[in-house]
Image (cartoon, coloured by chain):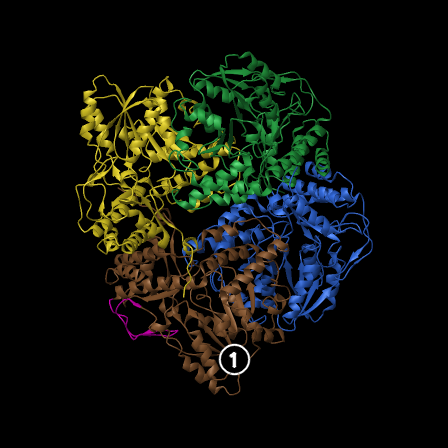
Chain colours: A green, B blue, C yellow, D brown
Amino acid sequence: MTKPVSNEARMRGRQFYFNPGPTNIPDSVLAAMHRPAEDFLTDAFKAVLRRTHANLKHALGTRQHLLLFGANGHSAWEAALANLFSRGDKILMLESGYFSYHWTKMATELGLEVETLWADWRKGVPAAAVTERLAEDKAHAIKGVLVVHNETATGLVHPLAELRAAIDAAKHPALFLVDTISSFASMEFRFDELGVDVAVGGSQKGLMMITGLSFTAISQRAMEIAQSGGGLRRSFFDWRAMMTVEPQRFPGTSPVHLIHGLDEALRLLLEEGMDNVVARHGRFADAARAAIRHWGDGAASDARISWDSVEGEIDGIQILCTDPDRLSDSVTAVFVPDGHDANAMRQIALDRYNLSLGQGLGPLAGRAFRIGHLGDMNEPMMLGALATIELALKASGIPHKSGGVDAAIAALSA
Amino acid sequence: MTKPVSNEARMRGRQFYFNPGPTNIPDSVLAAMHRPAEDFLTDAFKAVLRRTHANLKHALGTRQHLLLFGANGHSAWEAALANLFSRGDKILMLESGYFSYHWTKMATELGLEVETLWADWRKGVPAAAVTERLAEDKAHAIKGVLVVHNETATGLVHPLAELRAAIDAAKHPALFLVDTISSFASMEFRFDELGVDVAVGGSQKGLMMITGLSFTAISQRAMEIAQSGGGLRRSFFDWRAMMTVEPQRFPGTSPVHLIHGLDEALRLLLEEGMDNVVARHGRFADAARAAIRHWGDGAASDARISWDSVEGEIDGIQILCTDPDRLSDSVTAVFVPDGHDANAMRQIALDRYNLSLGQGLGPLAGRAFRIGHLGDMNEPMMLGALATIELALKASGIPHKSGGVDAAIAALSA
Amino acid sequence: MTKPVSNEARMRGRQFYFNPGPTNIPDSVLAAMHRPAEDFLTDAFKAVLRRTHANLKHALGTRQHLLLFGANGHSAWEAALANLFSRGDKILMLESGYFSYHWTKMATELGLEVETLWADWRKGVPAAAVTERLAEDKAHAIKGVLVVHNETATGLVHPLAELRAAIDAAKHPALFLVDTISSFASMEFRFDELGVDVAVGGSQKGLMMITGLSFTAISQRAMEIAQSGGGLRRSFFDWRAMMTVEPQRFPGTSPVHLIHGLDEALRLLLEEGMDNVVARHGRFADAARAAIRHWGDGAASDARISWDSVEGEIDGIQILCTDPDRLSDSVTAVFVPDGHDANAMRQIALDRYNLSLGQGLGPLAGRAFRIGHLGDMNEPMMLGALATIELALKASGIPHKSGGVDAAIAALSA
Amino acid sequence: MTKPVSNEARMRGRQFYFNPGPTNIPDSVLAAMHRPAEDFLTDAFKAVLRRTHANLKHALGTRQHLLLFGANGHSAWEAALANLFSRGDKILMLESGYFSYHWTKMATELGLEVETLWADWRKGVPAAAVTERLAEDKAHAIKGVLVVHNETATGLVHPLAELRAAIDAAKHPALFLVDTISSFASMEFRFDELGVDVAVGGSQKGLMMITGLSFTAISQRAMEIAQSGGGLRRSFFDWRAMMTVEPQRFPGTSPVHLIHGLDEALRLLLEEGMDNVVARHGRFADAARAAIRHWGDGAASDARISWDSVEGEIDGIQILCTDPDRLSDSVTAVFVPDGHDANAMRQIALDRYNLSLGQGLGPLAGRAFRIGHLGDMNEPMMLGALATIELALKASGIPHKSGGVDAAIAALSA
């Protein structure tokens, strides 16, 4: 007879980690940070920093400006706001969900005026609404249009090329700021081609690194605004001070170990090729969606989501995002049917099977779970996670049609 | 369009490693060996060695003797032969497959006379045949009965309690030597209860360690033989010299780092509890067998295997071992149908999906593949491997009934 | 004959790292960060964060408030300013050298008015000058008194208890803010006993961690100011938002790996005992000073240092700090005689002997080098560094009296 | 007041490890072994094994044969004896100390007849004595001449070129077997040029690896003897079976992780260049000897050492080896004066200062200590160790002349 055993003891094998961030870290990236202290003023370290810069710019598709921050993505959010906008400036935020809400909150705290284009979290903001609003703004009071490219809370993607075109259609000079935190290195993103002014990203998602670094790609136009006296009062986040040395300064001691980790992560990504990275994420997202649709067996609903609530009925497992052109390739949020508890299922997946899934955020708490299928991932990992989700659905009594993994295998075999 | 990419570059995520040995190594075991050089004569290191001994004896279910060797399982094989038998002694080997053949070869090279009880590799030797043979040996010329508990090449288990009873039934004094290399810490094994005289094991299977250590549990009776002048001429492998210090000496420098790794691996196993470890392996083996039987859709055959050849037809995917009471919980060998190449399938699994499977050995080369489901493993890993095997079966055109993973999920949900 | 070899290839053995920060990182701290990604919302991680908080508060000698920041010490500098002072507030900075200059610069950029109590970098500000200046400020326009406890650029310590008494003597309500970045966990510091209002520290000095974390201890009085509407507009750095969860929130994703590293570093420090840590730093600093004084053979000078220049002659090796009561136990800055290049000597130490020393900052560039003798360090390391400095002095032709290491050995034997 | 603290807790900084083996392991070598399990039958691993072979042959200066063993140097000792000599063969062993004694013991246990050329451990065997003894052996009964190149117990080197010439002078066909365990990759050794037949080495000395691997370089003539039926009965150690695959087979599972570590260690050595490696060891040994002679202040004695005893008086610190042409560059054994306890001094060095020194072996227990100055080492490490020995001499009251480190610095500055 087997004895009872603590969860921790039972947990043989590596945890299957399918949260949308932080994400799985390659062994070689961890190894690159397992190193002694180092003087960051040496030529040897400067060469590493220059290579990291060059490789990240290549991965981002930009020949304009790049700055790294020794802190997480929220720091790059604040730096972008602080360097480009002045007290009382109006900016336009496209609602996508949890993270557009928090970026808005930050801007407000810093003294900016934020106008939100409201949207159902399952659909996002239509590009036409952007053109319409900007066209009304004859005085060009709106200084920036801000969007979270991939909303991590919902698995919904706003189409950047369409949005750029929408701004252009209104002939409006607003800066175009994009949060690429959970899209970069998972979905296609080419800074220069897209005509973005600021892209903010973090180390702990597609870049497969630990949390602690973030970056900002900056257009020449945006940099000129920051350099020529624009922006809020700032010191730690001041782009100007960071630009005084090539490729950059850090305020205070440089985050040497984190730079070494990022350097290795970029080596892996560029070796694979960014197009291949993107294609791989597409395949795995397709597999996940095939399994989810199989489990749901055609379930769909008109329920809408806002910051406060989910309105309407959810009568079967279904993908949260209802616009087929806006499905995320890095994270998929999944509704469980009304009357069932997504968090109870997640806890079973974690406690019994060592599978970590993302929780529903804000109004989605308990209503949805999230599968993070981005970063350092391969077919057996993806299929193992989906099979284990099916195990956990069974164990928690959530109605579903068996055979989701077969659908995923079929998708990957196509 | 995606660019072609080298296999190595494509290999995101950790390799799924389902070879029957070496096996997956827990991170904490690797970390335990990532340490500076250390003087092995200090009290601090001696305490680690004593703890490792005590824990390994506990895991083996013995209060008799234990010795570690700073080399792989073949070294422990040779030590057992050299310490117990004299030039020209006759020993009886139960054929199980590839590894019983090689242990036989070693004994012959050392000057022993080996008589083999031949068997079909799919069935192994009946216990009754042991009684029968020993009963004939009135003069007790046979000094030892040797068996590979779990034949790694075939996934067939010889039943140790039955064999012990079979020796006893013949009232024969032969020593009972067991190779537990691919069974220990995966399937139940209790040295003292089973009345085994020598058990040989290695570090790189159920013990979840790197290759380089092996062990031998030794009964009081066997130790007395070794101590009282029995055995071949020997030095490096001499148990007597190793027994002069408590808990043991090593010939030459002690393998400090390897001992630290083993110490941590044993901590993990004992924390989980050996009964739980065994039960876990049983569950995962059941899941693997459910998938294989589903793929084979009832295929079975009378084909027999010997050292030279497979005789008979294989017309569908099937488990190699045909005795339901002798199925291995650590490795399953799987026939592919005639006309299909198991190695081509394995190569696809490795190159496209980063899944490493075991190859068919000896007469099974190209005819079978092996799934090592032992060591540091959990449900998502097991299910991910099975799903990916199904992907690879499809990609290589090997006939199978889709849905093997569903069968495995059902087995794990039972 | 030996062939020429690149510096990198020649560099056998670990680099001797005697920079004042980042500092040597214990193996177990690096190992604690060599771990997979982890969901920071689990109870398991929250327990680690709570333990880290509790241990750091214990080490700081405070029962008041503590916050960690996922960025370096400059971020904690800015947070302290932003949460406590309002636009146009006047603060009083005690000049110590390079870092008091930069904290001043930051405060100015954020819109505060900074008044500096100027000082010779070799002596620092007399406590009496603080009382004097505060006593003049009848209107209590000065909202804060700021000091860098240990000036990393010079190896000069400002006496905190005296400064506290000096503020009290003026009966002035100004907040007392202390930068402990290069003093904490090297020299005695007890937050509550000293009556400090804010202490700012970083991970990469006495805490023996990689760069990327910082902390702020906060008095109840300071926290009330921050909570009750005081301070500049802020978001990323807002203490209020961080205090909404016990023990704290991080803005955005928590720096999981860095917290694990800090947790292990604190375990090491508390195991040793903070008093022992301080005593150890004192012994090693004494040894370093004994060697330097021996090399200088009585050299001393009245040369003064300000932000712009060194005024006066340096005719022999000597310790930069001339006040025997203000000598640093974590870093010693050393003048080389006029006409000699400290950086050339440092380069020889690095290139030939793999010893990394700190450079002279600001007006001290080329005039002085710095020995960082803080963090994870023992007698052989300290003596090896001093012996190698003597090797490098000889190799670079800098006049010195041989035998510095003997003086250091004598100091350690005392 | 500081609290008492356990030794372990007090031990900040890396242990200074100056044992003659195992030796300090470079971080990159440890990192190379911190890797997942791997199928040793893949082309990728075979390429690593081939490169390791090629690099080790290059480092050894041989184009003849090489075999690696997945066990320590004693296993390679036994393999050499078992493959080349037959039961009852006579071999001639040159006494050097502890390790020549143990190799002799092994040969005797395996059934060989060993004749020893006795010597004072402080001087070793004169080359002329070899010629003399072989010249007497008209019947060529002596099949092999065996010598430990560098006796690890005493720091005495036997001159291989002289010994080769001595054998040749006697026109004797005996094989020439050399134990290079503590000399290889520290002192010059060129297998083919020296006309050696077998060189045995281990991973944990000059190769800077963990214990667990050993190697044997084998001349064409020796290999032919092994291949053509010579040697003892053997299986695990049979060179013939290992030679059946290019570059070699291992009996049983290949020691994958250890090979990866060795591969990295060889990369480091060849990058530095073997001539530079040898020169570096020479410089550090000179520095150590300069310090010891300074401490001894001219002390010398005629005391002799044999297996049983030290005969004569030791009235001051002195180097054990008295032949200036036979001083070891990898280890120096140091006598302490009569009436003083070398082990008490070693314990103080370890407990107070975290410096690990080698103990006196056999008759030298308590009379001598050993400084291992081989492997991954640089000037600051060497000087730090010597300075700390002087600290420990003072602390344990062993008479010495202060200033040993100055002498070492002078030696390194020469």
Would you identify the image quadrant in which residue B310 lies? bottom right
* Total tally of numbered discs in the picture: 1
Q: Position of residue B364 (x, y in %)?
A: 74, 56
The answer to which of D103 and A103 lies nearer the viewer is A103
Asked if residue C85 is positioned above or below residue C27 in the image, the reply reads above
Would you identify the image quadrant in which residue B108 lies? bottom right
Q: Position of residue B404 (x, y in %)?
A: 74, 40
The answer to which of A196 and D313 lies nearer the viewer is A196
- Magenta range is D297-318
Task: Provide the major secondary structure of the magenta segment.
Answer: loop
Residue at position x 46%, y 21% in the image: A106
Asked if residue A345 is positioned above or below residue A209 in the image, the reply reads above
Q: Chain of mark 1?
A: D
Element marked by disc 1: loop
Residue wearing tag 1: D174
Type of amino acid at the residue the image marks with label 1: Ala
**Residue C287 highlighted magenta (yes or no):** no
Asked if residue C341 is positioned above or below residue D90 in the image, the reply reads above
Q: Position of residue B236 (x, y in %)?
A: 53, 67
Residue at position x 60%, y 75% in the image: D224
Q: Is residue B235 visible?
A: no
**Residue D308 highlighted magenta (yes or no):** yes
Would you identify the image quadrant in which residue B111 lies? bottom right
Asked if residue D87 is positioned above or below residue C359 in the image, the reply reads below
In which quadrant is the N terminus of chain D drawn? top left
Q: Is residue C292 left or right of residue C39?
A: left
The answer to which of B162 and C401 lies nearer the viewer is C401
In which quadrant is the C terminus of chain D drawn? bottom left
